[in-house]
Image (tube, rainbow, N blue to C red):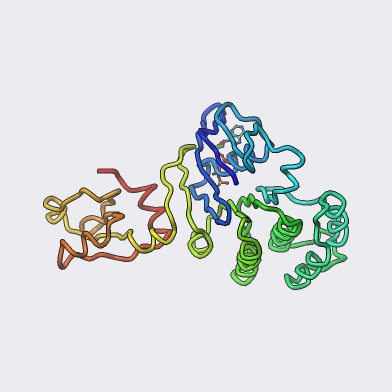
Amino acid sequence: MLKLTNLTKKYQDFTLNCSLEVRPGTITGFIGANGAGKSTTFKAIMGLISNDGGEMELFGNNRQAPTVEDKKRIGAVLAESCFSGELTVKDISRVLAAFYPSFDKKLFLEKARELSLPENKRIKEFSTGMKAKIRVLSAICHQAELLILDEPTAGLDVVARDQILDLLREYVAEDENRSILISSHISGDLEQLCDDFYMIDNGQIICHEETDRLLSDYAVLKVSDKDLETLDKSYILRRRKEGFGWSLLTDQKRYYAENCPGMVVERITMDEYIMMMLKGETL
Ligand SMILES: Nc1ncnc2c1ncn2[C@@H]1O[C@H](COP(=O)(O)OP(=O)(O)OP(=O)(O)O)[C@@H](O)[C@H]1O
């Protein structure tokens, strides 16, 4: 569906070098700290900025940037983008119907009602959350095969976030070839939604993992300074100093549970994983 190989963008004090793949029928998460390079990657994929090297394969074709036809097959939500403040939901439905032959106006207006978006209010009078909802809705109502979503749930309350996540789940469930690439600072959203995820740090992809594997095989081990000295560290990915000793990130939870009786082996959340990967030391 989408494959980036060493896609490069150079700014004065920042270099992006990104390789990732979004397979048909999957939701791929894209995580990283502020300034890590997520929006730059999304903009490069959509051709909003030129790239300085690398390759992009989109719908099976090598591309420098998506063509007009490619764009009709993509639904995108990019940071800071929104419709003109003068438009209403009804106006937007007309604009999208004119651009996308496969735009489903009935679905759009129906979902807008479900999301409590008034049809005749202008976008400039919308709240931040309402704007976020209309952006996502606009991306999913033209039967796109690929969604590119940069922080689609930013600024939404818990209920609205849940509604958006449901929309995205429905979108993928309706057609097994549809895919999503999504970034979010809310790791719980990604944990619930994504099949796999990439983590980017300072412009470089530092890991790629299946979400199921993260939840089943990764763990945080809690050990004292003394225990750390004698521990088999073959499967330790990161360590962090704590008051009691060390927190250790492993991707071989069972190995330590079986071989180190008495050791505290804690289930990991996406948040802890991100913290360990970004703030922990390698051994
Ligand atoms: N137009 C630009 N000119 C120069 N540097 C830029 C430009 N756009 C982005 N950058 C730099 O590229 C780096 C990555 O920025 P980017 O917006 O991709 O991060 P991000 O991962 O999306 O962060 P956030 O989570 O805060 O949105 C930052 O150091 C930023 O200053």
- The image position of residue 271, as x and y in percent, is 43, 59
- The image position of residue 107, as x and y in percent, is 78, 67
Residue name at image x 88 percent, y 56 percent = 94
265 vs 59, left or right, is left
Residue name at image x 87 percent, y 65 percent = 120
Quarter of the figure that contains the C terminus: top left
Q: Nearer the viewer, residue 62 or 206?
A: 62
235 vs 231, left or right, is right
Q: Nearer the viewer, residue 24 or 79?
A: 24
- The image position of residue 217, as x and y in percent, is 33, 60
Taking 185 as reference, is 115 above or below it?
A: below
Residue name at image x 26 percent, y 52 percent = 241
- The image position of residue 151, as x and y in percent, is 60, 53
18 vs 145, left or right, is left
Ligand 1 in which quarter? top right
Count of residue discs: 0
Taking 108 as reference, is 30 above or below it?
A: above
Residue name at image x 35 percent, y 52 percent = 276
Taking 248 as reference, is 202 above or below it?
A: above
Quadrant of the rendered image containing residue 219: bottom left
